[in-house]
Structures are given as structure tokens and as C-alpha cells.
Amino acid sequence: PPRKLSPAARRWRRAISQSVMDNASPEKALVLLKTPTNTVVFLATRRILSTMLKRSSLLDDEIQRFGCRALASLSKNTAAGAKGVLDAGGPRALVHAMRAHPRNPEVQSEACVLVINLTKHNAAAASTVREYGATQPIVDALTTHKTVSDVLVWASAALGFLALHDASGAAAVIAADGHSAVAQVMLGPSRQTMPADADVLPVIQQWGAALLSNIARHGTAYASAVAAAGGAKAVCAAMRAQPDDASMQRDGALTLVNLAKIDAQSAHAVTAAGGAELLVMALRAVIGGDSKEPTWVYVSGLGHLAKHSAATAEAVAEAGALD
């Protein structure tokens, strides 16, 4: 950005800053102030970041919450917008907010939404967010706010996007024990930790299944981590609870395929959780529907299950794989 801002640039910069304090829509300010998007996003982010890092107010938690929301709005729709926020230090702001107010669920959930918007576009963006140390605070939010629906949903989704693009992202989630935390959430809360919105569990399961699939597909070591965290049980429970959700069935089945490849112990865990039946159901849905998923993936998974032991082979046969 130029060293000296034009009067117009100064006006929209003030408007963006004020939107943070007033909880107004950042997009509204951007529409009113017709400036190039890349410049707007970069300079607006710098201004918001400066406000968030001051921490000079008794209302700092509100500043952090609205700041994360504003940055999430700026980065929501395009890779260019996300890059502008990234280049201006947006990840620093969200990590600062999460660490400054770990007990505030609204700050945590708004920061997780920001992580999603920054990381969904490409691996470079996800890598930048990880380098700022965002992974561990997200996992901490999951384990701290076990009864808050928004945190459970958006933290699970954020971890899924961090693990989506490459093996290093998956490794970072495993190192922070994020896969274990999400697997436990997918299995459903206890009565002591039931979220206020009990209907949120299917959404958590969908994001969780995507996360475990994103991790397990990177190789045996990653699939083994998912297996050790109880991934087979979590995935099977989610697939069984949502038989008509295509993305759930796809992500769950692909995870089970990767778990089946590992060893006899993992294959037994899959069959014990009902994975053979669920893989057969998924395969039949692919064959009988208009899905573009390759059938060999599911056939391969059933083959891996069957090869490990007589018990797992019997489970595959009883599931109807030979019909």
C-alpha cells in the first residue's frame, strides 16, 4: 500500500474501523467506498489488526469478537480477499483473540469461522494460518466449550480445512490431538455436556467425518492415528445416524477404506463397529445411483477387511459383499 493515503482511502479506512466497534457490516462499508478490493482488504485488515492488538479497553472481548467477524467477512467469498487478510496479518489477529479470551465461546467461534474462510482456498493459505499457531487454540476451544454448539461446529470445521490440502496440515492436527477431540465429539455428548442445541450433533458429525477422511487419506501413519483415536467407531456411528446424507456416507466410507488397509487390529475395529455393512451399503448406493465415486475404492476396502483374518472375512461375507 502507498505510504500516503488519499482522502478517499482514509475515509473508508475509518469506516471499516468504526464497523468493528459498532458491529456494522464490513461489506456495507466496502460497497459504499468504491476502492479496489485487494487494497481495501489489505489496509482494512491492517487497521482492524491494530485495533484488536491494542487491548486497551474493558470491552476487549467484544473488540476481538467483532474484529474476527469483520476479517471473516472480508475473506469470505474469494481467494483474493482471503489473501489480502493473510498478507496483512489476519492469522496473527485470530490467534491473539483466541489466546486472549479462551473462556469466551463467542470469540472462539468467530475466530474459527475466520480460520475456515482463510484456509479453504488453497494449501498455501492453510500453511500460513498454521505457522501462526492457530491449530492448538482451536483444539483447546473444542475441549473447553463442550456444551457450546457454535464452537463445536466451527472448530470441527476449521480443523477439517487445516487438514484438507496436504499431509503437513493433517500432521499439525494430529500433533494438537485434534483428531481425537473431534472423534469424541462425533460420538455424542454425555448428559453432563449436552449442548443447548442438541440438533447440532449431525452437523458436528458431518464436519468430523470430513476431518477424519482428510487425515486418513494421507497414508498409513495418518490412518493409524485416526484408528487409535477411535475413528472407526465415530465414523460408523455418524454414517448410521445419517444414512441419507451423501457427503457423510462418502467421507465415512473413504475413511473406513483407509482404516481397513492398516492391519488386523484396525480391520477388526472397523468390523466391530459395523463398518463392513456400512461399506456394502455405500457401494450399493454408488452402483445404483448417479455418483461419480469409483466403485473400486469400496471394493478395495472390503477386500482389505477380508484379508486380515477369518473373523473379518466372515464379517464381510455376512454384510452381503458377495451378493
Image: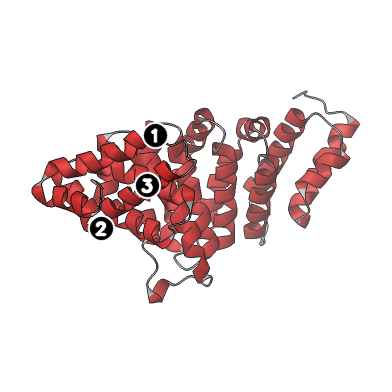
Q: Secondary structure at mark 2?
A: loop
Q: Determine which of the numbered discs, if any, sits on residue 177 in the image.
A: none
Label 1 neighbour load within 10 Å: few <14, some 14-19, many 20+: few
- Furthest toward the right, the residue is 7
Amino acid type at mark 1: Pro
Camera-side mark, 1 or 2: 1
Q: Determine which of the numbered discs, if any, sits on residue 284 in the image.
A: 3
CA gap, disc 3 and disc 1 = 12 Å
User: Which numbered disc flags the more N-terminal residue, 2 or 3?
Assistant: 2
**Residue at point 64%, 57% (across, down):** 60
Camera-side mark, 2 or 3: 3
CA gap, disc 1 and disc 2 = 24 Å
Q: Is residue 96 left or right of residue 50?
A: left
Check the image and tell me how it is coloured: secondary structure
Residue carrying label 1: 294
User: Which numbered disc flags the more N-terminal residue, 1 or 2?
Assistant: 2
The answer to whether residue 56 of the structure is visible from this angle is: no
Residue carrying label 2: 273
Percent from the top left, x then y, of residue 24?
78, 54
**Residue at point 15%, 47% (across, down):** 313
Label 2 neighbour load within 10 Å: few <14, some 14-19, many 20+: some
Q: Are marks 3 and 1 in contact (CB under 8 Å)?
A: no
Percent from the top left, x then y, of residue 278?
32, 53
- Furthest toward the bottom, the residue is 191
